[in-house]
Image (cartoon, grey):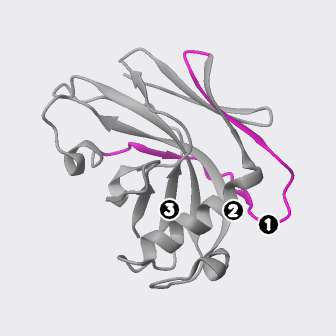
Amino acid sequence: MNIIVFKRDGSWCHRPDSSLNHIYLDYYRPEFVQRSEVVPVVYTRIVKAGKCIPLRFAQRYFGEFALGCTINDTTPGVSEPMASSLDFTSVMGMDFFPAIGFNDNRLSLEINDSETCVISTSSLADEFCKAISAISQRSTIRLGDIVAMEVGPAREIAPGDTVSLCRDGERHTLKII
């Protein structure tokens, strides 16, 4: 299983499956990490394998969404692959909601109980189609892969902070330790 993070600038990277944190475990920041950031993402599971997927067919390759975030090491001098490969830094709830036929949901990311990013789900399916089509031009996507699409700006976090992911009254919180 791959975790593919599609960034706001149109680039993407692969994260190891050891980075998956799907039960909102607290994040213990290693001592060598001097700075870190949290980025709100929306995840989808790939339900069909493909390569070079045309935009018009991309919706056939995913089915549900889940709110989450990624935590990145922003210590000066750390390369992109190292910055995104730490264990338990791809935070994803298992409470998926359908991609087709859902009402406009309100998703938000809060740091220390202060709302930092609000996401509307109304255009997520179209955005995921673009992401999956772009990714599949260079990488084969496989059944069971997870695509995480960045949906908001990165925010710096520090030990002691709490990060909450909220969807329609549901709230999941993890602490940065």
The quarter of the displayed image where residue 164 is located: top right
Q: Which residue has dot 3 on it?
A: 147
> Residue 38: x and y, percent?
43, 32
Q: Quadrant of the N terminus?
A: bottom left
Secondary structure category for the residue under label 3: strand
Secondary structure category for the residue under label 1: loop
Residue at 73 percent across and 49 percent down: it is: 121
The quarter of the displayed image where residue 176 is located: top left
Residue at 22 percent across and 51 percent down: it is: 81
Left or right side of 8 for 72: left
Left or right side of 169 for 164: left
Q: Is residue 88 magenta?
A: yes
Residue at 23 percent across and 47 percent down: it is: 80
Q: In the current view of this chain or complex, which residue is farthest to the left?
A: 77
The residue carrying pointer 1 sits among few (fewer than 14), some (14 to 19) or many (20 or more) residues within 10 Å by Cα, namely: few
Q: Is residue 36 magenta?
A: no
- The count of marks equals 3
Cβ–Cβ below 8 Å for labels 1 and 2?
A: yes
Mark closest to the chain's N terminus, 3 or 1: 1
